[in-house]
Amino acid sequence: MDTLTLSRIQFGLTAAFHYLYPPLSIGLSLMLVFMEGVYLKTRKPLYEHLTRFWVRIFGLIFALGVASGITMEFQFGTNWATYSRFVGDVFGSALAAEGVFAFFLESGFLAILLFGWNRVKPRTHFIATLLVALGAHFSAVWIVVANSWQQTPGGYHLVTGGTGTRAEITDFWKLVFNPSALDRLFHVYLGAWVAGAFFMLSVSAWYLLKKRHEEFARTSMRIALTVAAAASLLQLVSGHSSGRGVGVNQPPKLAAYEGHYADGTPADLYLFGWVDEKAEKVTMGVALPGMLSYLSKGSTSAPMKGLSAFPPNERPPVNAVFQSYHLMVAVGMSLILIAWGGMLFWWRKSLWTKRWYLWILVFSVLGPQIANQAGWFSAELGRQPWVVYNLLKTSDGFSPGVSPGQVMISLALFTAMYLLLFILFLFLLNEKIQHGPVDDLAEAEGRHRA
């Protein structure tokens, strides 16, 4: 393989591995604020008990997120030098804002969150929890802004100098509020909240199946199920809004989502299928006629931009985009059914007796991860062949001085390192879950009796 292909594989690997952790930390941070807030209001030891246990899990996830994210930034300079030069002025501002307004805030109060239980007042600890959660959410803002600028650039002009052409910011707020930023940010937040909620549901269901820490597990499950039900349903609204934006700003991507080739004709919405890119059609598929047109423009007969309107060398890899997008949708719909099924069982007071449903919850932790990964793959592959849409092609963005052998060696090292990190994460996570929250509850109740 050539340097470009290997560099894309390497960045895809590191980005996908890193994105296992930020959604969990963002989602868990939201529920930590809720749990500790209820504790401050009610002074019930159970809610302090809940917060203490999930804070330890949050700390582990945060550590892996930081460790896995650092290597991504190095690759901008090593494997993507031309791209880094082109977007440096834009990304420098966004990533600097992330460091100042998000990462420092989150990491600065993390020590109080993790180790300040018996050293600061309860309200001070709650403020630290709130600020860590805000930092986690602010971090997503600037990363999504930077990525969204690649999809829908705004607030810039092009400058040509001795080192080539680069983008230079002319309006910072147009950069921040580029056409796709808000839709994508809300979509990312909802995906993170769903991931955190189903993670908590999985652990809670496991405890209930094993008849351990049952009061703890039931309370955790009520909180997580409420968040999962609300966020998974709102994801439909967010996805619809985001999809309409894609149709306006990146029509080849939307056409690839549904394998729509014919230009100026109504577009179908596929439940599943396989795109034959040579024949330029979807085979073995089941479609809802005209539904993509209806969702995009309000009419089943509305004409849509098709892939045939674009040269073959400016089309994304259609079948890969089609499959990853439909995988995201299918998993997302399944999560809605699982969450709202749980709400129904809760309302009927039979949630704790449905062992088959609890087993579904145990494995449902994989669902949001699959959906989040598939969503990012469809978004990033759908932008191809552009690394910055309509401004810089991916084939022009890599480092020409790097050899395939060098990238191959670093790819092998990254793969081995990330595999070891993931094994370590699973081992430590299992240790914390198996140990359980017993000591926390005893300590909390003893302090309150004192």
Image: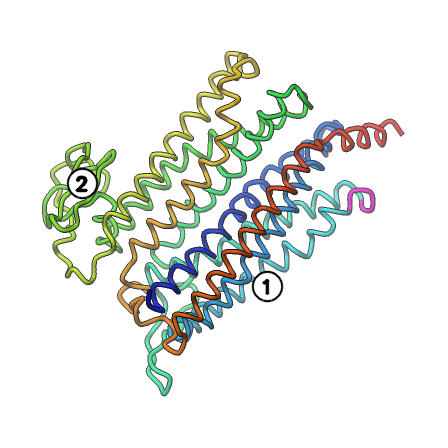
Quadrant location of the C terminus in the rendered image? top right
Position in image of residue 406 (x %, y %): 44, 71
Dot 2 amino acid type = Ser
Q: Going from the N terminus, do you reach mark 2 or mark 1 first?
A: 1
Based on the displayed image, in which of its 4 quarters is residue 56 positioned? top right
Based on the displayed image, in which of its 4 quarters is residue 220 positioned? top right
Segment colored magenta? 116-120
Picture disc at residue 121: none
Dot 1 amino acid type = Val
As rendered, which of 331 and 246 lies closer to the eye? 331
Position in image of residue 360 (x %, y %): 48, 25
User: Would you say 90 lies left or right of 240 here?
Assistant: right
As rendered, which of 23 and 156 lies closer to the eye? 23
Quadrant location of the N terminus in the rendered image? bottom left
**Residue at x-position 51% and y-position 59%:** 414
How dense is the environment of label 2, judged by Cα within 10 Å: few (below 14), some, or many (20 and up)?
many
User: Would you say 41 lies left or right of 387 here?
Assistant: right
Picture disc at residue 293: 2
> Quick check: is 24 in the magenta stretch?
no
**Residue at x-position 36% and y-position 87%:** 162
**Residue at x-position 48% and y-position 65%:** 410
Position in image of residue 123 (x %, y %): 75, 42
Spatial CA distance of label 2 from label 1 is: 43 Å
Disc 2 and disc 1 in contact, CB within 8 angstroms = no
> Quick check: is 118 in the magenta stretch?
yes
Q: Please determine whether, in this image, residue 11 is positioned above or below residue 263.
A: below
**Residue at x-position 46% and y-position 72%:** 78
Under circle 1, the secondary element is helix
Picture disc at residue 100: 1
